[in-house]
Image: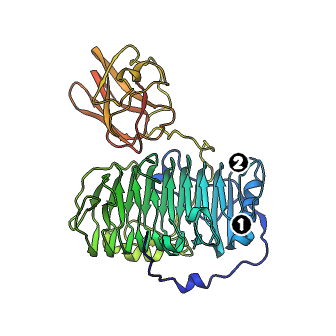
């Protein structure tokens, strides 16, 4: 059980005004508040634009937020909901409709897509009421405060999570928010920012997480390894006991964050998780990076971090701190462009930009602050959740003959009940899976064959499990290309007799149904 958090609640939070009335939904011109542009992993898999290009409405109650969702033409019709005032249990009721699936006592973003919720005017405070994102995609949450959400005691909401995501969620950008509690698990609180059950392509940026036993997790248990591709940048974690964040499997990019008073542990990479930890500032904290409370190892790549008055515990069976001199034990490839602020200026930049009510200011990448760029005006082409991440390169489907049909196959290992040959039999119901979370599978011919594209097709139910990979010329050992995520992969046309797809990172158990090869 978590020990009680030493509270340092701000006077500003305590002084937030309570909204008057039962709420309104006012149609506004089709132009939303300036929300900037998504960053990090939220830019992948088609990108994250929320309700851009759709109608904008104003809401002052939770019921009005639900009514706006339910009033759309469909569950994927883009909408921006500008929120002002205090949203609480008393003013958040269930609303029914064909384009929504809501519930009382929680802001329910369930089985929907293309939605922005942004705080405006005097601010938006979700008081003891969480935001639940389930079976949803292309969601933006910005410039709001969520506080004191409980899983036990009274009132309860959202399983105790300030913002929680689960069940096939894709592409969420949470930006310039303040998430806070008033204690740990024994006081009824849970996580501030949790992801589980196949949640992918999420960015948390320019936000404050404070006064909680648990900052947030990726994966609900050691067996929930279907989550990943999460970016955390320019956030302030303050007075948190642990989980800043807790990573169970998956890939995370954690950069330019300011950590102050992590009381028990910080970034907890375990169960095969891989974290790239760049240019963060850790201050007055304990065990800020490592594998904790388990013997299931996780991994990290570190560079440019500052450790200011950080203490480290003695390594043990279930605790493996990265310090006192943290070194990288893996490499993590990042597929998007980003610019790092120097760690030395992170406390200043984050203090001026992070949290709700900061004017959506951002870093310019050179330790200075600027206004955000404008939001795209149109939503992504796909407006409904999809269990299969988009390919990282190449066209959506190669043309020509699949050269793997009738070829041979081998690999580094295979899980019980699977076969190497299943990847070149043209049958999506059969598959190869490595004995562990990583491994290699090859297609081979009796003579040199020209190949310029491969298409890695995952088996049903395992989409998104494949993380980092490289394609290797099996004749010479040369790496032809590398990246992350299954799909079509293009490289310079090469004559070879064997081509290998090597999985070097995964967020679950990889299952390759077909390893297709093409000449062009």
Q: Are marks 1 and 2 in contact (CB under 8 Å)?
A: no
In the displayed structure, would residue 342 be above or below residue 402?
below
Cα distance, mark 1 to mark 2? Answer: 18 Å
Q: Residues within 10 Å of mark 2 (few under 14, many from 20)?
A: many
In this view, the residue in front, 122 or 365, is 122
Image point (39%, 77%), residue name:
348
Image point (70%, 48%), residue name:
75
Query: Considering the numbered disc 2 on the image, is that residue within a helix, a strand or a loop?
Result: loop
Say which mark, if any, is on residue 123: none
Query: Considering the numbered disc 1 on the image, is that residue within a helix, a strand or a loop?
Result: helix
Q: Earlier in the sequence, mark 1 or mark 2?
A: 1
Viewed as shown, does residue 110 lie left or right of 244?
right
In this view, the residue in front, 409 or 419, is 419
Residue 309: quadrant of the picture: bottom left
Say which mark, if any, is on residue 62: 1
Quadrant assignment for the C terminus: top left
> Can residue 366 be seen in the rendering of this structure?
yes
In this view, the residue in front, 176 or 221, is 221
In the displayed structure, would residue 518 be above or below residue 303?
above
Quadrant assignment for the N terminus: bottom left
Locate residue 254, reporting x and y percent. Answer: 38, 60
> Can residue 52 be seen in the rendering of this structure?
no
Residue 410: quadrant of the picture: top left
Locate residue 390, reporting x and y percent. Answer: 50, 39
Locate residue 405, reporting x and y percent. Answer: 41, 16
Residue on which the image places disc 2: 75
Viewed as shown, does residue 121 lie left or right of 72?
left
Q: Residues within 10 Å of mark 1 (few under 14, many from 20)?
A: many
Mark 1 vs mark 2, foreground winner is: 1
In this view, the residue in front, 391 or 150, is 150
Residue 306: quadrant of the picture: bottom left
């Amino acid at each position: 059980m978590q020990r009680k958090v030493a509270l340092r609640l701000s006077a500003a939070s305590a002084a937030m005004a309570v909204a008057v009335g039962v709420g309104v939904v006012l149609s506004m011109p089709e132009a939303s508040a300036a929300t900037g542009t998504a960053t990090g992993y939220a830019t992948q898999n088609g990108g994250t634009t929320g309700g851009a290009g759709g109608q904008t409405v104003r809401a002052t109650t939770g019921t009005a937020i639900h009514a706006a969702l339910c009033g759309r033409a469909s569950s994927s019709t883009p909408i921006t909901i500008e929120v002002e005032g205090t949203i609480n249990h008393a003013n958040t009721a269930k609303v029914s409709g064909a384009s929504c699936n809501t519930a009382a006592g929680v802001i329910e973003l369930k089985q929907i897509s293309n939605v922005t919720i942004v705080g405006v005017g005097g601010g938006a405070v979700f008081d003891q009421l969480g935001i639940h994102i389930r079976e949803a995609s292309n969601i933006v949450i910005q410039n709001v405060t969520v506080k004191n959400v409980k899983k036990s005691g009274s009132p309860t909401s959202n399983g105790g999570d300030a913002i929680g995501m689960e069940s096939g969620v894709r592409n969420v950008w949470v930006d310039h928010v303040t998430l806070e509690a008033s204690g740990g698990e024994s006081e009824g609180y849970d996580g501030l920012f949790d992801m589980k059950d196949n949640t992918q392509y999420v960015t948390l940026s320019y936000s404050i997480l404070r006064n909680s036993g648990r900052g947030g997790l990726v994966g609900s248990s050691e067996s929930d390894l279907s989550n990943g591709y999460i970016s955390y940048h320019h956030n302030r974690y303050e007075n948190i006991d642990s989980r800043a964040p807790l990573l169970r499997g998956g890939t995370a990019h954690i950069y330019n964050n300011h950590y102050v008073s992590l009381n028990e542990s910080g970034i907890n990479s375990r169960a095969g998780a891989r974290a790239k930890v760049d240019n963060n500032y850790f201050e007055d904290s304990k065990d800020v990076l490592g594998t904790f409370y388990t013997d299931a190892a996780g991994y990290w790549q570190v560079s440019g971090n500052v450790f200011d008055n950080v203490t480290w515990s003695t390594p043990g069976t279930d605790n493996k701190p990265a310090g006192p001199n943290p070194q990288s034990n893996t490499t993590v490839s990042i597929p998007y462009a980003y610019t790092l602020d120097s760690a030395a200026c992170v406390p200043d930049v984050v203090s001026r930009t992070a949290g709700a009510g900061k004017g959506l200011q951002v870093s310019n990448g050179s330790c200075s602050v600027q206004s955000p760029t404008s939001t795209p005006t149109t939503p992504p082409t796909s407006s409904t959740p999809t269990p299969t991440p988009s390919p990282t390169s190449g066209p959506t489907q190669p043309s020509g003959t699949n050269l793997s049909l009738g070829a041979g196959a081998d690999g580094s290992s295979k899980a019980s009940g699977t076969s190497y040959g299943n990847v070149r039999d043209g049958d999506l119901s059969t598959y190869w899976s490595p004995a562990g979370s990583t491994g290699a599978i090859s297609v081979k011919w009796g003579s040199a064959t020209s190949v310029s594209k491969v298409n890695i097709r995952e088996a049903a139910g395992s989409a998104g499990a494949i993380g980092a990979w490289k394609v290797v010329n099996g004749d010479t050992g040369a790496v032809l290309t590398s990246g992350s995520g299954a799909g079509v992969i293009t490289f310079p046309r090469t004559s070879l007799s064997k081509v290998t797809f090597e999985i070097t990172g995964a967020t679950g158990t990889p299952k390759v149904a077909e390893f297709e090869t093409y000449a062009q």
